[in-house]
Image (spheres, rainbow, N blue to C red):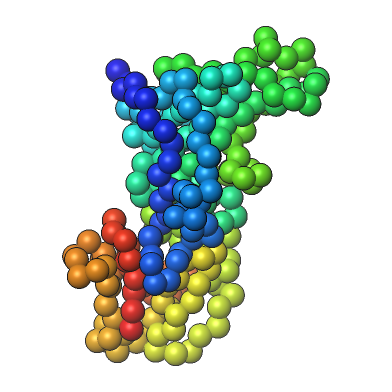
Amino acid sequence: MKKVLCASLIALVVFACNKKEPEAVVNAEQEAARMIVPDCAKEIITDEPVKVGETGIVLPIGTKLCFSTDNLEIRVELPAGYNFWSNKALPIYATYTCNCSASGGACQVFYADGLGFGCLQSTCSGSCTGKFTYKGYSVDKVIFGKTDFFNLPEVQKEIDAIQSTDAYSKHSVYGISFFIVSDEAKFMAAASCDCEDTQACKLKTINLLGRKIYFCEGPCNGCELTV
């Protein structure tokens, strides 16, 4: 059974919340202040992964779905650790809507257990096509954490173009910072993950394109790699 709630969709979280060095294209606190959230006619939390039809997006367990009173959109909030992606890291929410080819306007959306998202063709004399958007951006996929981020082809292309001969050097791609390391002993002697004196922020590494990539990640406010 999916839990029915009566809450507003307000939380905005990014990959690595970072007071000192923001690592997202949108500042969460500013967005929260600006965002006006309509009432939900119904809100549920998914208890299984949900495929979103023609978008190719799969929403993880724990995603919140907020249904508008006019049935013209479903506002989605991802659980912590996940982000939407559209050639940049987006916050954890997006909106699913359907467009009618005949009128150029909206047609109604629906959600059903086991079927997921869809468009009500009966509300349009042409054909209805559904999509996810965030502030005008067409949302391409859902990613989980920085490991998924570094596995994106467009991210790897940017990293591959970076020239560095230093023992270690700091870089940023699509708003996410990291270090390229060639001398691990020298780097590890100076590197640390700071998260307001907690142990939640962890140093992680991946091998990417023949290089060692280091970054910090964790569920805390201010997870930052410093050297």
Tell whether 225 sits left or right of 87. left
Q: Residue furthest top?
A: 122
Can see residue 142?
A: no
Residue at 34% across, 24% down:
5
Residue at 56% across, 35% down:
95
Can see residue 174?
A: yes
> Which of the 4 image quarters holds residue 108?
top right
Task: Give the image location of residue 184, x and y in percent.
Answer: 31, 83
Viewport quadrant of the N terminus: top left
Task: Give the image location of residue 28, x and y in percent.
Answer: 45, 54
User: Observer-nearest residue: 204 or 223?
Assistant: 223
Task: Give the image location of residue 76, x and y in percent.
Answer: 47, 34
Asked if residue 56 is positioned above or below residue 198 in the image, the reply reads: above
Report how many numbered discs are placed on residues in the image.
0
User: Observer-nearest residue: 39 or 182?
Assistant: 39
Task: Give the image location of residue 167, x and y in percent.
Answer: 39, 89
Residue at 34% across, 74% down:
225
Viewport quadrant of the C terminus: bottom left
